Amino acid sequence: MGPNAKVVVLNNWTSVRDLLDLRGNVHLAFMPYGSQWRTARKTVMEFLKSSEVDKLLPLQHAESVQLIHDILHNPERWRDYSTRMFGAVIMASVFGIRGTDISPEGKIMTFFDVQAEWSGIVAQGAAPPLEVFPFLKYIPDFLTPWKGYKRRLADVKRRQNKLYHDLASEAKTRIDSGKGQDSFAAAVFRNNHKTEYSQEGLDYLLGLMMEAGSDTTANVFETFVLALATHPKLQAQIYEEVDRVFGQKVMPFASASSDDLPLLRACFYELLRWRPSVPMAIPHATMRDDFYEGMFIPANTTILMNSWAINHDPDEYENPDSFDPSRFLKHPLGLKSTPDTTDKVLDESIEDADTSYGFRRQNYGFGAGRRVCAGQRMAENSMMMTMAKLVWAFDVVPAHADAQLDTSVHAWTDAILMTLKHFGVRFVLRSEDKRAVIEGEWERADGFLRKFE
Ligand code: HEM
């Protein structure tokens, strides 16, 4: 909760547009909106703008080849490999370091471990509501339901800081020795005479990219695997599309610009709508007093954007709880009708909002307002690359033919970042010829990825 213990939950897209996108007088609870944030956002946007991010496609291709090769050889560990892959794309592009290790002590798994712990600690209801009941701080820790909360928070923060610091130091040493010159870290170190980040600021800025870009994307990919296993007819249609474009002899190289894969792209949009991995986005907070539709919202009120409710609004989406990518083939925003666009003054500055639909965003899975996800294009490239290869290589089926896989909300953990609980799937190689193609591509990919060692 915000410092004044007040919370406003935005449950429809028009209130998100009005309060976050058009007024923009809010900031993120975790890093106040101010000059420090503006500098960081500018640095991050420079690296994540489409023209720069598309240069990472060969890396995303090579890493996704490794993912498919890993699944082919050891399908039981597919989730470890998916975690590794999305972490490794950020490690290589941000720090210039290759991430191959999937042992629990390796950098990527340590990162995911710390991240899961942090996400659990800050989840709604897991932290003591000290702003509402200040007397709680006088109650001995062992008598509260949040027993050990402070110690756990301090411990996770210490582990996180150490990990970020170690990664930044390793990147610096490599960059000083002439390696990793085109990484985000190298650009940040080169320009630091202008931006003047402290050591802690640098560690945090680089760590933030890892935090923001890896498990979010891994979660969406894992949801795709579940969607394939539970929608065999749809899977056959996606395979048909991928096969038509790439054929049998090469592994797909797909990206956000692949206009010849409309169904695959629709799957990406539908995954973000159906099961948004950050269902309440990141808490924002108002900087000053405000009025909205007759309501007074004092400064320092926490603003929660309920992407889940927006994405499942039955007035806007046909059968909102069904996974149905075709809705995005019928309507660019996946809607059953066009929302009213006439009542609001439009502001040309909103990124990624479609003016033809009254500044409604294409989807709300990436948040909204000034703090909207900076990595949307990078996420779409990574997802298109991996989804196309997965479908090209394997038929994804439930582990037990007669078992019904759960796709209800109960199949996910309840935390800031929704993660799928265990579910059983098998990956059936589509043809023996493809095994040889995968092995050949893997050799080339491994050669490419060696430059990050
Ligand atoms: C499908 C995958 C992804 C999802 C669902 C996602 C979702 C989000 C959400 C919900 C936010 C908070 C927005 C808000 O508060 O309104 C966010 C912020 C952010 N995301 Fe993503 N994200 C994804 C991938 C990425 C990638 C690949 C990167 C690249 C490193 C990235 C970088 C960022 C950054 C830097 C921010 C913070 C922006 C700021 O505070 O100014 N994200 N993301």
Image: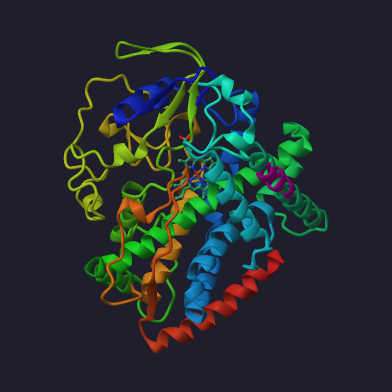
Which quadrant of the rendered structure holds the C terminus? bottom right
Q: Residue 388 in the image: x percent, y percent?
A: 39, 67
Q: Determine if residue 48 is in view.
A: no
Q: From the viewer's side, name the closer residue of 338 and 408.
A: 408
Q: Is residue 354 left or right of residue 128?
A: left
Q: Is residue 299 left or right of residue 177?
A: left
Q: Is residue 286 left or right of residue 196?
A: left
Q: Residue 284 in the image: x percent, y percent?
A: 48, 28
- The residue under the point 50% across, 33% down is 371
Q: Residue 89 in the image: x percent, y percent?
A: 58, 59
- The residue under the point 33% across, 51% down is 409
Q: Is residue 12 left or right of residue 143?
A: left
Placement of 314 over or under 452, stated as above or below: above
Magenta stretch in the rendered image = 155-162
Q: Determine if residue 200 is in view.
A: yes
Tell me where residue 37 sits by quadrant: top right
Q: From the viewer's side, name the closer residue of 409 and 42.
A: 409
The chosen color scheme is rainbow
Tell me where residue 309 sits by quadrant: top left
Residue 142 sits inside the magenta stretch:
no
